[in-house]
Image (cartoon, helix red, strand yellow):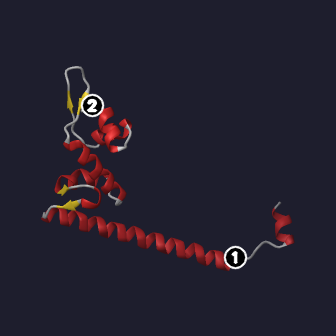
Amino acid sequence: MKIGELARRTGVTTRTLRYYEEQGLLHPERESNGYRSYPESSVTRVEQVRDLLAAGLSTRVIRVVVPCFEGSGSQLRPQVDGELAANLAREVEQMDARIDALTRNRDAVRRFLRGATPPGPDRHSASA
């Protein structure tokens, strides 16, 4: 199928599909006229990539792990693979670290807000 058909069937733009190709997530064949030709399996692959992106994985990680998945949407399931499990466990640890950092940042901002005093008439006019 051509890139436009794949875009229509998956609900993504042709630009997104070209980006996925650049990232090594899709591998179309090139016809003699230079057009991309995608196999039927590309529909599922695009859905898998979108699901994994929505889960917070980077394209770098997806490139490594997507071959270990089957299905898409609510049926997306990893195949049993030790390397995949280790990669996903590292991703979870990194996500947890980012969540912890964001939680600390949010809590600090909340403390600043609670301790803030509204500007009085003298403070407001002095800064104007």
Location of residue 15 in the rendering, given as x and y in whole percent from the top left corner? 38, 36
Q: Earlier in the sequence, mark 2 or mark 1?
A: 2
Q: Circle 2 sits in a helix, a strand or a loop, which is it? A: loop
- The structure residue drawn at horizontal position 31% and vertical position 70%, both measured from the top left corner, is 93
Q: Which mark is residue 116?
A: 1
Callout 1, which amino acid? Answer: Ala
Estimate the x, y position of residue 13 in percent, counting from the top left: 38, 39
Q: Is residue 7 above or below residue 109?
A: above
Split into 4 quadrants, where in the image is the N terminus? Answer: top left
Whether tag 2 and tag 1 are in contact, CB under 8 A, the answer is no
Q: Residues within 10 Å of mark 1 (few under 14, many from 20)?
A: few
Query: Hey, which quadrant is residue 30 in on the image?
Result: top left
Left or right of residue 109, residue 56 in this image: left
Position of residue 45 relative to residue 75, above or below, is above
Calculate the distance from the C-alpha at mark 2 to the C-alpha at mark 1: 59 Å
The single residue placed furthest to the left in the displayed view is 81
Query: In the rendered view, does 102 fall on the left or right side of 128?
Result: left
Amino acid type at circle 2 is: Lys
Mark 2 closeness class: few <14, some 14–19, many ≥20 residues within 10 Å? few
The one of 6 and 54 positioned closer to us in this rendering: 6
Q: Position of residue 83 (x, y in %)?
A: 15, 62
- Which mark is on residue 2? 2
Of circles 2 and 1, which is in front?
Answer: 2
